[in-house]
Amino acid sequence: MKPEEFINEDEEYIIPVTWEVYSTIKVKGAKNLQDAIEYAKTHIDDIPLGNGEYIDGSYKIEINNDDEAIAAQDYADIGGVVIYTNPYREYALEVKVNGEFDRQIDIFVSAEEAEEAAKEISLKPNETIDIVCIEYDENMHELSSESIY
């Protein structure tokens, strides 16, 4: 399978990234600098990560082939960083009373999901359902809002 054939229903994808930091450690109890260096080298896997400074230009996408890109979709999202395509779209299911906005029911990633949810809504005689496509830029600033239903 190729990445362009891999489609996730919620339109969210995990992209592994790496970056480098510069930091220092302090070695106490060594006889001299050479012993301190040797001790650090032989115990590198046991040294806890400390605070560091980001190394400019080191942020990289860590995907080398199609298989890695697809396998990454099974990873847990550990970074907590979310970016949005430009434009990013979501679909709001809204209820109008006498043609005026009354309340928003939910937000969906696709018009199809919003339409399916709309079928389940019980309305009063003066209420109607509207599905609104909202477009955002990559910083989630609203670009446009248009009724599609």
Image (cartoon, helix red, strand yellow):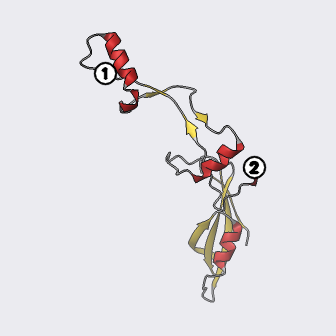
Residue under circle 1? 26
Task: Look at the image and tell me whether residue 50 can be seen.
Answer: no
| Residue 147 as seen in the image, left or right of residue 95 | right
Residue type indicated by callout 2: Lys
Residue under circle 2? 2
Task: Look at the image and tell me whether residue 40 can be seen.
Answer: yes
Image x and y of residue 22, in percent: 45, 24
Question: Considering only vertical position in the picture, is 123 above or below 82?
Answer: below
Residue under the image location 55 percent in, 35 percent down = 18
Q: Which label belongs to residue 78?
A: none
Categorize mark 2 by other alpha carbons within 10 Å: few (<14), some (14-19), many (20+). few
Residue type indicated by callout 1: Lys
Residue under the image location 56 percent in, 48 percent down = 82
Quarter that holds the C terminus:
bottom right
Of all residues shown, which one is farthest toward the bottom?
A: 125
Q: Quadrant of residue 33?
A: top left
Earlier-in-chain disc, 1 versus 2: 2
Image x and y of residue 46, in percent: 36, 32
Image x and y of residue 117, in percent: 63, 76
Q: Find numbered disc 2 in the image and state the secondary structure of the residue it sits on.
A: loop
| Residue 85 as seen in the image, left or right of residue 22 | right
Question: Considering only vertical position in the picture, is 94 above or below 17?
Answer: below
Q: Quadrant of residue 31?
A: top left
The residue nearer to you, when weighing 73 against 95, is 73
The residue nearer to you, when weighing 108 against 19, is 19
Image x and y of residue 34, in percent: 35, 11
The residue nearer to you, when weighing 18 against 123, is 18
Of all residues shown, which one is farthest toward the left?
A: 29
The residue nearer to you, when weighing 6 against 51, is 6
Question: Considering only vertical position in the picture, is 109 above or below 126?
Answer: above
Q: Find numbered disc 1 in the image and state the secondary structure of the residue it sits on.
A: loop
